[in-house]
């Protein structure tokens, strides 16, 4: 059966009406939307064909039709009109992301919150892990005789700290010496080299010095190991409950659990893909079988990549979501680029 231009037009009308109204679309509305150029009888025949071809579905309780995942895919690939963010939306995004670059974690969390607020769906942000990262600097801050704070700055300028406790009292005035030892011998090298170097020093240091040194190294290697993994930030999970498809909390429960407790399983696009749309069963994760994901990537710099994604019903407004995510991704790439600042507005708003 041929997918004619008229069938595509009807599929487009059904999809966009269902996105707006969340109600099955009947032939009467389609006839009006097409300006009366096609009779209701012809439209009903075309709807039957589109249903048989798998592009539309007919809920049992209604004579109207809704798009199937296959129909949404055709709509996204061929029928959806490309959009751009409005000047007001662009200004809001620029204001939120403007200025000097903040700690990467803060930028990711803020970007996710902004996207979720604008599209009214849950959002997630992530930074692709960076392998081969090393420590640039250590600082050790005294707390009391049995504890100190280890501060680690990685080569990509992330700063992490942790309170560490020892079994033996720290010798008075020795923390600066240990910090100097760390900065002299344990910066700019891999975690494997750090472990080997620590073992080589075992026989040269007293236990009360070797123990805090080994604790600081253990903390630093943990920081580097975590930096090699994706870091996910999710927000807006409860926005799912405002969508008709997820009014039943039982249906939304698995998806909310994924966003909250198993967020590392959220989709990550291929490295060379700037934008990816996954519709319903195209998502590998079972919790996403009745949802769609739109995710965009951007360049953080230092050979690192960031991700910003939206999770919503298959009925989501793909054109609007894709436009906003694309603008976010472009803005974040620019922010992490030229002097870590956003360009003037006229540089990136057409």
Image (cartoon, rainbow, N blue to C red):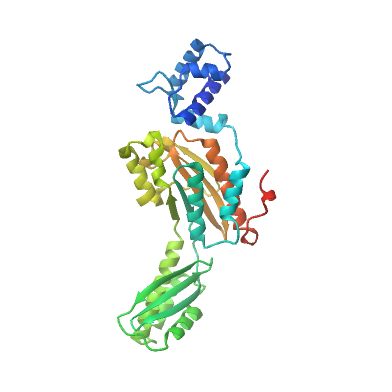
Q: Is residue 298 left or right of residue 172?
A: right
Residue 201 spot, x, y in % from top left? 41, 83
Residue 244 spot, x, y in % from top left? 39, 33
Residue 161 spot, x, y in % from top left? 43, 71
The residue closer to the viewer here, 197 or 53, is 53
Q: Is residue 126 above or below residue 282?
A: below
The residue closer to the viewer here, 286 or 123, is 123
Q: Quadrant of residue 273?
A: top right
Quarter occupied by the C terminus: top right
Q: How many labels sit on residues?
A: 0
Residue 107 appears anywhere in the view: yes
Q: Is residue 71 left or right of residue 340?
A: left
Residue 288 appears anywhere in the view: no
The residue closer to the viewer here, 97 or 229, is 97
Name of the residue lying farthest toward the right: 346
Q: Residue at (52%, 42%) from the top-left corner?
A: 276
The residue closer to the viewer here, 32 or 348, is 32
Q: Residue at (57%, 18%) from the top-left corner?
A: 34
Q: Quadrant of residue 300?
A: bottom right
Residue 227 spot, x, y in % from top left? 46, 62
Q: Residue at (45%, 16%) from the top-left corner?
A: 48
């Amino acid at each position: 059966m041929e997918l004619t231009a008229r069938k595509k037009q009807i599929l487009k009308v059904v999809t966009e009406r269902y996105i707006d109204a969340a109600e099955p679309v009947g032939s009467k509305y389609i006839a009006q939307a097409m300006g009366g150029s096609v009779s209701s009888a012809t439209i009903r025949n075309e709807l039957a064909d589109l249903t048989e071809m798998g592009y539309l579905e007919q809920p049992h309780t209604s004579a109207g039709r809704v798009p199937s995942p296959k129909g949404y895919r055709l709509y996204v690939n061929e029928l959806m009109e490309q959009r751009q963010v409005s000047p007001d939306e662009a200004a809001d995004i620029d204001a939120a992301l403007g200025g000097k670059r903040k700690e990467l974690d803060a930028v990711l969390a803020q970007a996710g919150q902004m996207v979720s607020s604008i599209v009214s769906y849950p959002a997630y942000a992530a930074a692709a892990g960076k392998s081969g990262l090393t420590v640039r600097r250590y600082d050790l801050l005294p707390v009391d005789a049995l504890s100190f704070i280890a501060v680690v700055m990685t080569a990509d300028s992330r700063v992490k700290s942790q309170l560490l406790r020892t079994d033996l009292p720290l010798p008075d005035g020795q923390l600066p010496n240990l910090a100097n030892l760390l900065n002299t011998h344990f910066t700019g090298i891999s975690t494997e080299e750090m472990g080997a170097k620590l073992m080589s020093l075992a026989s040269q240091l007293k236990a009360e010095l070797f123990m805090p040194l080994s604790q600081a190294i253990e903390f630093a290697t943990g920081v580097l190991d975590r930096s090699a993994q994706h870091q996910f930030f999710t927000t807006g999970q409860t926005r799912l409950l405002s969508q008709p498809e997820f009014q039943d909390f039982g249906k939304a429960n698995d998806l909310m659990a994924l966003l909250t407790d198993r967020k590392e399983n959220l989709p990550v696009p291929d490295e060379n893909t700037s934008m990816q749309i996954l519709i319903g069963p195209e998502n590998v994760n079972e919790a996403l079988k009745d949802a769609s994901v739109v995710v965009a990537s951007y360049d953080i710099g230092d050979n690192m990549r960031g991700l910003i994604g939206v999770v919503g019903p298959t009925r989501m407004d793909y054109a609007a979501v894709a436009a906003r995510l694309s603008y976010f991704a472009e803005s974040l790439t620019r922010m992490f680029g030229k002097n870590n600042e956003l360009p003037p507005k006229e540089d990136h708003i057409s």
